[in-house]
Image: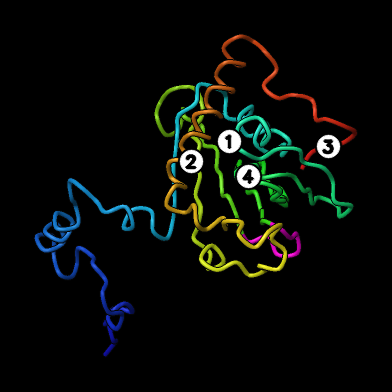
Amino acid sequence: MSDKRSPLADIIGLMRIEDPGREELTARCVELTHAVYPHHQVHGQYCTIHEYVECPPELTYDYLRQGHHLEEWTCSLRDFAPTGIPGLWVGRDRIEEDTRIYCRVVANPEAMTVDYHCSWDQGEKLWMIYLMRVLPALDVLGRPGSVIVWTNCRHPYYDVNPHPELAPRPDRPWVGDYWDLFYAGHTLEMNNLKAILEHRHRNGLPIGIPAPGTGRTP
C-alpha cells in the first residue's frame, strides 16, 4: 500500500487551502489586514519602496547601472573616485561630515537588477547592500515605462558599527542611527530619480551624463 501522506505534513505553521481550509485561510488573511501598521512592523527589518517612472526600462536600467549617477539622484553621495581596486570606488556621504562611503556596482542586464554594495569607512566588507530591480511597466501595469523596486535589509552592522576605530571622530553618528528614516529618505531619492529620468526622456535629452574622468563608472 502506497503512503500518500503529504511531504509537507510535518512542517508546522503552513497555511494552505487544503489545510486548514478556505474559510480559516480567509479569516487569517482578514486578521492580518489592518488599517494602521506600527512603523517597526513595516520597516523594522526590511525597507522596500517602489515607483512608476515614465522612461523605458532599458534606459532606466542603463542609468542605474552606471554608478556615477548616484551623485545625481541620491541626497548625499558625492565625489566618487577610484580606490585602485578594480570596480571599487570611494566617495563622500555628506549626511555626516568627513564620512567616506565605498561602493561596488553589481548589475545583471538580463534581469535588470542593479545592486549597490556599500559601506561607511572601509571597503573590505561591503555590507550595506541596496537592491534595485527595473520592471517593464508594460508587463506589470499595462502601460509604457518602468517600475523600480528598491529594497534594503537590516544587516546587524546597522545596529553596531563593526569598525568604530575608522570613524573620522568619536562622536560621529552611525549610519544605523538613521534606519528609522530610511523609508522617508529613500522615498525622497526615488522621487529625485523619477524626476531626472522623466525630465530627460520627455524632452528627448540623453538619459545619462558623461562619467567624470576617464572610465569613471563606480
Where residue 83 appears, as percent x and y from the top left, is 85, 51
Range of the magenta residues? 121-127
Q: Is residue 181 above or below residue 174?
A: above
Q: Is residue 8 above or below residue 181?
A: below
Q: Nearer the viewer, mark 3 or mark 4?
A: 3
Q: Main secondary structure of the magenta part?
A: loop
- What residue type is disc 3 on? Arg
Residues marked 2 and 3 touching at CB (< 8 Å): no
Q: Is residue 28 above or below residue 77?
A: below
To which residue does mark 1 refer? Answer: 75
Distance between the alpha carbons at the discs numbered 2 and 3: 26 Å
In the drawing, what numbered circle is on residue 114?
4
Q: Quadrant of residue 1?
A: bottom left
Q: Quadrant of residue 160?
A: bottom right
Residue 125 within the segment the image draws in magenta: yes
Distance between the alpha carbons at the discs numbered 4 and 2: 19 Å
Query: Callout 2: 10 Å neighbours few (<14), some, many (20+)?
Result: some
In the drawing, what numbered circle is on residue 216?
3
Q: Nearer the viewer, mark 2 or mark 3?
A: 2
Where residue 4 appears, as percent x and y from the top left, is 27, 81
Query: Callout 3: 10 Å neighbours few (<14), some, many (20+)?
Result: some
Of pointers 2 and 3, the one earlier in the residue sequence:
2
Distance between the alpha carbons at the discs numbered 1 and 3: 20 Å
SS for dot 1: loop
Of pointers 1 and 4, the one earlier in the residue sequence:
1
To which residue does mark 2 refer? Answer: 185
In the drawing, what numbered circle is on residue 164?
none
- What residue type is disc 1 on? Cys
